[in-house]
Amino acid sequence: MADPSAGYFGGAGAAGARAGAAATSIKASDAAPYLARYSADNFSAAAYDSSYSKLRRWIEESLDVFKTELKDILFPLFEHSYLDMIAKGMVNEARQFFDSYKSDHVAFHSNDLHQLDMIHFPTQIQENEYARMHRSNRFTVSMTSTTFQLLISFLEDNDFVALLRILNTHVKIDVTNSKAKKKASGNTGVLGLTSNLGEFHAQSEVHTGMPPLDVRQLSLQHRAENPADPPPPKPVPVPPMKAKEVRETVELIKDVAHRASLSPTSLPSICFYTWHNTYDALTCATMTHDATLIAAGFSDSAIRIHSLTKDPLRAVIPRPGLTPDDMHHLGPADIDAMREPEGSPSKLLRGHAGAVFGTSFSPDKRYLVSCSEDQTVRLWSLETFANVVCYRGHSYPVWDVEFGPEGHYFATASHDRTARLWSCDHIYPLRIFAGHLSDVDTVRFHPNSSYLATGSSDKTARLWDVSRGACVRVFPGHSGAVQAVAFSPNGRLLATAGDDKYVHLWDIASGTRIKKMGGHRGLVTSVVFSSDGALLASAGLDGTVRLWDALKGEGEDEPVVVVDPATGKKKRKKVANNDLIETFRTKKTPAIGVQFTRRNLLLATGPFCPDL
């Protein structure tokens, strides 16, 4: 019988054995000396191609126990080999190299390949935003000490100096002592990470509990479930409740009393709202928590608000001489007396000068906030259906906006790589959250309002402390942009999803991933927890709404035995444990938004697309 290790060591058995023997004592801090001496830069295109091709073949022939870790190193080597050749003016050779090996990385780095494919000339290395970001920040890869030693020994024994130089210059290898520690670190693929994630998370404690006696959060059930979960030491200040807000709180309590109890065997009712004749112009849509209003943004800068009940929308027409301050002191009967006599089923709002990318209703349904390509955020009154305030501060298009649980604050996410915190009574941002390396695509408030979660095109989600404006958690693991994030009602879990078609569930306190759930066949646009936290719903461009079990225990990658149709041999393969409960398919409508009402009715929406 052939030696099972022969394919892995590939002729460099002595070096591999020597490396394996030495691996038990290496520490993470010892990785740099192995690489630091490789700084020369006089390699030909053939050197890059030959060394990468042989490394690729060596990894494919390696033992399965090391192959998964070794494959993580291939993409940064491929990417920087290509960029190195472009920077040296070897354009034709670089394109040939790119076309030869790009198929290896389509599954996990399709967006990166698209960005690389647009870089053809040396000047673009400094001008292209993607190239600048990846050349100035190290790509983090986690691997065990044994795997690291085997990799370095193979590269040194074959004199692959070009690849060693890339490792030294553009890659940060986080060496751990065991696979368990490697899995806990979760650093692979994170750009610009300067320390181990575990060490970073240990620097800041996250308090996911609710502020005491805050009836607006209605978190008594969650405090009973986890009484040890402390509230933030300094809750975010909010204005005192007004009489109208007290009445709304009473309605909230009634909704909770009539809330449907959900479980994997007791699924919610679903209502899907389809937009017709949008001609690919619909960019976003959101609904109120009582399913009475829906607002949609369009690429022609318009916002449309529709009534989801039989009651028409009747705008308030203030009497002459009545100031905004006077309006605030009027009672409901006085305001109703000034409404339009007839009304209409929908209202059109105009004011933005570019496509509208996000809308959000205030919890009391008195205001709507919207964000746009024109770099502004606008606050609209749902009494007069008119623009009240225009907020300026972002320097690039604003992709998302979200009202906080109290309705006093809102947050925005932008192409300028920042998220910002605003209050309705200030025209300037109160906090700027900077740290992402690419567009911030989505933003959501924690139920206690003390934290924000953001998702970014840099393939990470982050948790921010609102009081300090600091990042306290980084959640890596996605292979594409993170387009959707959502907190569980008790504030202890975070769900993320995006371009890679997977939904990830995270424990916020420890910053570790609980499970990775797969099933969507297209970009995941929205995720939301049920009001009791039992289920997680996701919407995707594949025209489906999917329900997942949010309370099931940790979902590890499950090994299954599959038969290779070409050889007939059995082999073990790991597949994602997705905890999928049910899939609801539309006919020809991609789902762009999904949310639960307070009574656990699931709402979803999207534009009719005959080509789907």
Image: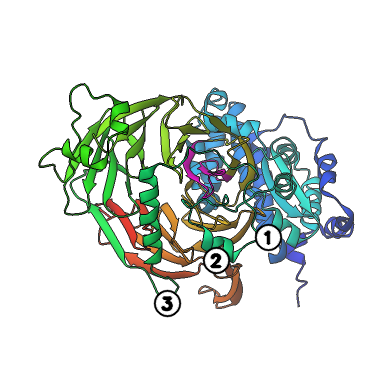
Of pointers 3 and 1, the one earlier in the residue sequence: 1
- In front of the other: 602 or 166: 602
* Label 2, label 3: how far apart the Cα atoms are: 22 Å
| Image coords of residue 403 (percent x, y) | 42, 41
- Could you tell me the amino acid type at mark 1? Lys
Segment colored magenta: 439-462
- In front of the other: 112 or 298: 298
| Image coords of residue 135 (percent x, y) | 63, 32
Kindly identify which numbered label has been placed on residue 576. 2
Q: Is residue 130 left or right of residue 370?
A: right
Kindly identify which numbered label has been placed on residue 67. 1
Q: Is residue 363 visible?
A: no
Which label lies toward us, 3 or 1?
3
| Image coords of residue 366 (percent x, y) | 32, 40
Which quadrant of the view contains residue 347?
top left
Q: Which type of secondary structure does the marked residue at label 3 adopt? A: loop
